[in-house]
Image: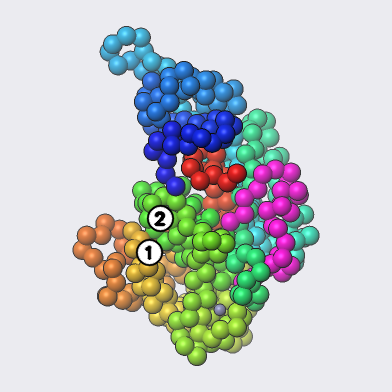
Amino acid sequence: MKINNPRRIVGSNAERTRLHNRQVVLGLVREHQPIGRAELARFSGLSTQAVSNIIAELEEDGFLAEAGRHSSGRGLPVLQYRLNGDGAAALGIEVRPDAMFGALVNLAGETLYTTRVALPHNDPKTVLSIAQSILSEALKASCGSGQRLLGAGVVMPGPFGNVGISGAGQSALHGWSDVDAAALFEEALDMAVVVENDATAAAVAERVRGIAGGLRTFCFLYFGAGLGLGVVEDGEVRRGAFGNAGEIGHVIVTPDGRQCACGNRGCLETYASRIAAREQLAKAGIAIASVSDIERLYEANDPHLMAWINEAAGPLSQAIGLIENLFDPETVILGGAMPDAVLDHLISALYLPAGSVAASDRRATPRVQRGACGRLTAALGGAALVIHDTITPRIAAKT
Ligand SMILES: [Zn+2]
């Protein structure tokens, strides 16, 4: 939710108001830096005294730094402020069925550390212990910089909770459907943790540091094990009532089509996903275990992989038409655990429906594009979510 007038939350308790006002000031500094306190007061609607108090507090906490003086020609030059990029950092962790990715990102959005760890099992005990080692390695790698760790954004494939499709075969993690993942990670990492689905986190990463920087409303089709959809509308992510919005992989595109692990037949995921690619290639006796395996096959122009791409393009085009008509996005981004070259080929093989709200002459961006954040996109998104939550105020904050 956007905040234009922070005074709208009058009536909340003092602590919430104080935190909210800090976020307002941080958000304005990020947007307009370098910026002086009079401008901050004008943009925020807070008094100059209130802004001065908040600035002092944020400087002491390491979030803000002075950025010289600006002379407007009249009176004394005005002291300017900017975000102190090195003042704080957030950890992003992505849990996939067969691997975990970690990324440490600072307040300025710079990546300080990244890693990939293969997963022998994806049960909670194994995953939590690897998360602890990712945290200690990340801290070691950034030691001496004196950063404050704001928390961790943990990214997992949905759906969350005990829902009808929670046992969706290979795209699900084992032993996670009945546990409070956020509480387990908070205990293991000893810090605040937000848990987000992979497609939503990838969409956030693409907005913060990828090709969606200037976009306010867009969708992200995420190739994890299955296929997920992240939706950003007017700058905010759409999660649904239970955090499970965007389970596009289990939308039926071919009635009576291929059997899906969720119990339905003809789900999109049985055609356009890594699971589908793996199964089609296995029929030809080819085993794939990683993105690099797929990359090698593509470079070798493997006919079975090419056949899968061409077959996936139809159902995927249909799904993109559906997404366009539902959400009216500025663009649909494809990304995740697929080599860039395969995604590019898949995009060129699409035949998007001409009858779509997106088939308009007025559009400034292509209907479909490949993401720019590569295979770390969801882990980076996890960290970006924590930073976003630190800087961006919300009216409807949870109590
Ligand atoms: Zn399904």
Look at the numbered discs 2 and 1 and tell me whether their residues touch, using CB distance below 8 Å: yes
Query: Mark 1: which amino acid?
Result: Phe
The stretch of residues the image draws in magenta is 171-196
Residue at image position (55%, 26%) is: 58
Residue indicated by mark 1 = 327
Residue at image position (51%, 46%) is: 396
- The front one of 287 and 33 is 33
Percent across and percent down for residue 98 are 67, 66
Task: Specify which label sits upstream in the sequence, 2 or 1.
Answer: 2
Rendered position, 77 above or below 199: above
Q: Quadrant of residue 168?
A: bottom right
Q: Is residue 297 left or right of residue 30?
A: right
Rendered position, 203 above or below 338: above
**How has the structure been colored for display?**
rainbow
Which quadrant does the C terminus fall into?
top right
Ligand 1 visible in quadrant: bottom right
Percent across and percent down for residue 204 are 48, 52
In the displayed orientation, state which residue is furthest to the bottom.
256
Asked if the beta carbon under badge 1 is closer than 8 A to the nearest atom of ligand 1, the reply is: no
- The front one of 262 and 395 is 395
Q: Inspect the magenta stretch and tell me whether residue 277 lies in it.
A: no
Residue at image position (60%, 79%) is: 262
Percent across and percent down for residue 132 are 74, 49
Q: Inspect the magenta stretch and tell me whether residue 185 lies in it.
A: yes
Please, what secondary structure does the residue beneath circle 1 have? helix
Q: Quadrant of residue 284?
A: bottom right
Residue at image position (62%, 50%) is: 194
Please, what secondary structure does the residue beneath circle 2 have? strand
Characterize the local packing of mark 1: few (<14), some (14-19) or many (20 or more) Cα atoms within 10 angstroms.
some
